[in-house]
Image (tube, rainbow, N blue to C red):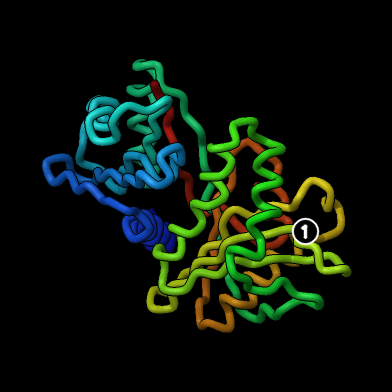
């Protein structure tokens, strides 16, 4: 594992712990901990088992998830360490779990400046209606859509600086949004959950958010910005055309 990927892995583990309402450390199972949040009980991001390093037999992960996450419609285990993920894949597949590959992409922020017009940091309340409207397009369950919208409030605890960015239309409508997490002390930032509303696509709002996130990271003295992309979906290539390079992979496993 490269030094940059190791720092990104540590960043992701620390973020998960800090935003969690409750963290369950499992010292008898090295590299494994659980995060829980009853306020967002349907959010898998906030109720999952996380493997940040080697040392635990992957065969025990389904049992640990059931024990520490309680009864759930579906369990999620995120494996941050790429080698542990590869070892876990055949074991969990044999147990009936599905795997989702995640690509870690990063690029330098050197020389990045805010575009014109730039996205702006806003309060959660300013983007909530747009986010909820998009969630309702994707999800029929009203309560699940609400939780996936409002869980952003928990992310405010995750990093030293957390910004909700909004790109607007010329008449002021929120067209696209993203989260930006900055840790100047460790020289890393993450751009997360970048979405353009369905009715506003094709107008360059994603580029505005990305360029603004890079510029804000540079202004904060953060030399590297990373993000996560589905290993088989188109955004991976979109980010690649904008200077992001793959530095590693992670895995998310889902089981019932």
Picture coordinates of residue 237 (x, y %)? Answer: 70, 48
Residue sitting farthest toward the left:
28
| Residue 91: % across, % down | 33, 22
Q: Is residue 247 visible?
A: yes
Residue 109 quadrant: bottom right
**Residue 240 image-quadrant placement:** bottom right
Which residue, given by chain and number where applicable, does mark 1 sit on?
175
Which residue corresponds to the image point at 34% horizontal and 54% vertical from the top-left? 20
Quadrant of the image for the C terminus? top left
* 225 with respect to 239 (left or right): left
Residue drawn at (39%, 74%) of the image: 186
Front-lying residue, 182 or 155: 155
8 and 165: which is toward the camera: 165
Q: Secondary structure at mark 1?
A: strand
* Image coordinates for residue 93, horizontal then vertical, percent: 40, 20
In the depicted structure, whether residue 152 falls above or below residue 90: below
Q: Residues within 10 Å of mark 1 (few under 14, many from 20)?
A: many
Residue found 43% across the figure and 45% down from its top? 40
* Residue 233 versus residue 239 in the image, above or below: above
Q: Position of residue 110 (x, y in %)?
A: 61, 79
Which residue does the image show at 38% across and 30% down from the upper left?
75
Among the 4 quarters of the image, the one containing residue 67:
top left
């Amino acid at each position: 594992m490269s030094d940059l990927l190791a720092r990104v892995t540590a960043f992701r583990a620390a973020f998960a712990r800090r935003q969690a309402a409750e963290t369950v450390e499992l010292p008898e199972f090295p590299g494994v901990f659980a995060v829980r949040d009853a306020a967002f009980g349907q959010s898998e991001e906030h109720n999952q088992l996380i493997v940040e390093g080697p040392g635990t037999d992957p065969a025990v992960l389904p049992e640990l998830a059931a024990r520490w996450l309680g009864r759930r419609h579906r369990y999620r285990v995120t494996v941050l360490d790429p080698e542990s993920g590869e070892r876990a894949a055949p074991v969990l597949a044999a147990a009936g779990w599905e795997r989702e590959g995640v690509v870690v992409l990063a690029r330098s922020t050197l020389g990045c400046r805010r575009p014109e017009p730039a996205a702006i940091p806003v309060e959660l309340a300013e983007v909530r209606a747009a986010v909820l409207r998009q969630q309702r397009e994707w999800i029929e369950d009203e309560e699940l859509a609400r939780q996936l919208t409002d869980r952003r409030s928990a992310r405010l605890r995750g990093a030293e600086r957390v910004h909700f960015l909004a790109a607007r239309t010329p008449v002021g409508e929120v067209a696209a949004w993203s989260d930006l997490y900055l840790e100047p002390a460790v020289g890393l930032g993450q751009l997360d959950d970048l979405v353009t509303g369905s009715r506003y696509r094709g107008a360059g709002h994603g580029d505005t958010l990305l360029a603004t996130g890079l510029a804000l990271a540079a202004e904060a003295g953060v030399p590297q910005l990373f993000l996560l992309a589905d290993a088989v979906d188109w955004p991976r290539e979109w980010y690649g055309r904008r200077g992001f390079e793959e530095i590693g992979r992670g895995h998310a496993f889902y089981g019932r």
